[in-house]
Amino acid sequence: MKFLSTALAVFALLAATTDASPMLRMEAAGKSKKGNVEQQDQTEQQQQDPVEQTSPTTGKGCNLTGTYKKGTDISSCSSITVDSLTVPAGVTLDLSKAKKGAIIEFKGTTTFGFRYS
């Protein structure tokens, strides 16, 4: 009986760590899509053409939509709405320069690009 319970515990632990681990699934997905040149070309195009982003800095509220551009100035915004934003691979969504006490609200879907190494 002890052997059966030990075997079941080991099996459950093995199943939980290999099948249910999101990090392992992400790594496996990255390796299987390594040769996907179309995705890489699309990501590079997004980095080169970030004109879709709008960020009206009126001193009150700012909207970040479209494709995020590195270095966007949000320092004068008292409220920031991130709505349906795409952050290209290799670019960090930097909200650290937001005004002290600023309200940051996420709406829609924020998508982060990734690079295959």
Image (tube, rainbow, N blue to C red):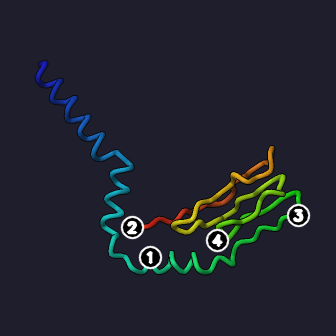
State the residue at coordinates (44%, 67%): 115
Residue drawn at (35%, 46%) of the image: 21
Per the model, the C-alpha gap separating discs 3 and 1 is 35 Å
Query: Mark 3 highlights which residue?
Result: 58
Q: What kind of element bears circle 4?
A: strand
Say which of marks 4 and 2 sits in front.
2
- Identify whether 39 is placed above or below 111: below
- Residue furthest to the right: 59
Q: Amino acid at mark 4?
A: Thr
Q: Which mark is residue 67?
A: 4
Q: Is residue 34 left or right of residue 97?
A: left
Please state if 76 lies on the left or on the right of 32 as rendered. Answer: right
Q: Residues within 10 Å of mark 4 (few under 14, many from 20)?
A: many
- Of callouts 3 and 2, the N-terminal one: 3
Q: Amino acid at mark 3?
A: Thr
- Among numbered discs 3 and 1, the one appearing first in the sequence: 1
Residue 57: quadrant of the picture: bottom right
Label 3 or label 4, whichever comes before in sequence order: 3
Q: Residue 19 location in percent, x, y?
A: 29, 47
Q: Between marks 4 and 1, how big is the CA–CA gap? A: 16 Å
**Residue placed under numbered mark 2 in the picture:** 116
Report the residue marked by disc 1.
40
Q: Residue at x 78, y 48 (%)?
A: 103
Confirm or deny contact between disc 3 and disc 4 (CB under 8 A): no
- The three-letter amino acid code for the residue at tag 1 is Gln
Q: Cα distance, mark 1 to mark 2?
A: 8 Å
